Image: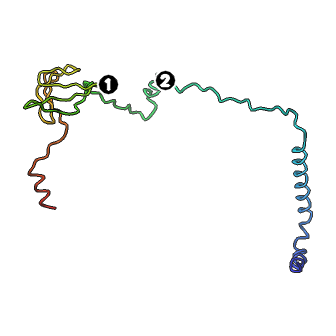
Amino acid sequence: MNQMIEKLRASLPFVKPFLPHIAALAFIALLGWANGYFQASKQVVNPDLTDNWAVPNWTPYRAGPERMIVAAMNIWDGKRAVVAKKDETIQKTWQLVGTVRSGKTYAAIIQLSEGKRIQRAVAGDVLPNGEKVIGVENGTLQIDIAGTEQEIKLFQSIKVTQTATQTEKK
């Protein structure tokens, strides 16, 4: 305690010019505390206060025709974006999921677009989009789409010589 008193006496000449400032600061702090105390101790005017606010009902964002009007304006960089033409593709309503063999003949297992129905298809059958099945082999399906032949494979076949050379290298 004596050390603190000695330090206070030693620093008193340096602090003496600032005593009016310290007194003013203490007075303002006392006023702030008194205001808070009296505000907190007042009687509440309405004790039945309830939160009755609601989330605002915002309209959904609509960027329909307005978006296209602004996008078509020549205000961006002076160059208009080149829109790539979409190729007309026939949308499949079916998917090849497998092939099965019955004796020497193969049949394709077709899953329809709903995903709930499975259908077998053999050479000569017509698929839901109007494609004609030309042939079915192990893991492949050949179809005729508007006069063009296509082959759909379940998996890529690997030649035996490639696998043999790869195992020899290891």
What residue sits right under mark 2 in the picture?
Answer: 66
Nearer the observer, 105 or 73: 105
Expressed as whole percent of the image width and height from the top left, the position of residue 144 reads 14, 24
Q: Is residue 78 left or right of residue 146?
A: right
Expressed as whole percent of the image width and height from the top left, the position of residue 36 reads 87, 48
Instruction: Calculate the distance from the C-alpha at mark 1 to the C-alpha at mark 2.
Output: 36 Å
| Amino acid type for the residue under numbered disc 1 | Glu
Given this view, does label 1 or label 2 mark the residue nearer the observer? 1
Quarter of the image that includes the N terminus: bottom right
Expressed as whole percent of the image width and height from the top left, the position of residue 135 reads 11, 28
Quarter of the image that includes the C terminus: bottom left
Q: Give residue 121's quadrant in the image.
A: top left
The residue shown at (90%, 74%) is: 12
Colour scheme of the picture = rainbow
Expressed as whole percent of the image width and height from the top left, the position of residue 45 reads 88, 34
What residue sits right under mark 1 in the picture?
Answer: 114
Crowding around mark 2 (Cα neighbors within 10 Å: few <14, some 14 to 19, many 20+) is few
Chain-order first, disc 1 or disc 2: 2
Crowding around mark 1 (Cα neighbors within 10 Å: few <14, some 14 to 19, many 20+) is few
Nearer the observer, 169 or 105: 105
| Residue 91 visible | no
| Residue 95 visible | yes
Q: Is residue 79 above or below residue 5?
A: above
Q: Assign a secondary structure to mark 2.
A: helix
The residue shown at (48%, 23%) is: 66
| Amino acid type for the residue under numbered disc 2 | Glu
Q: Give residue 57's quadrant in the image.
A: top right
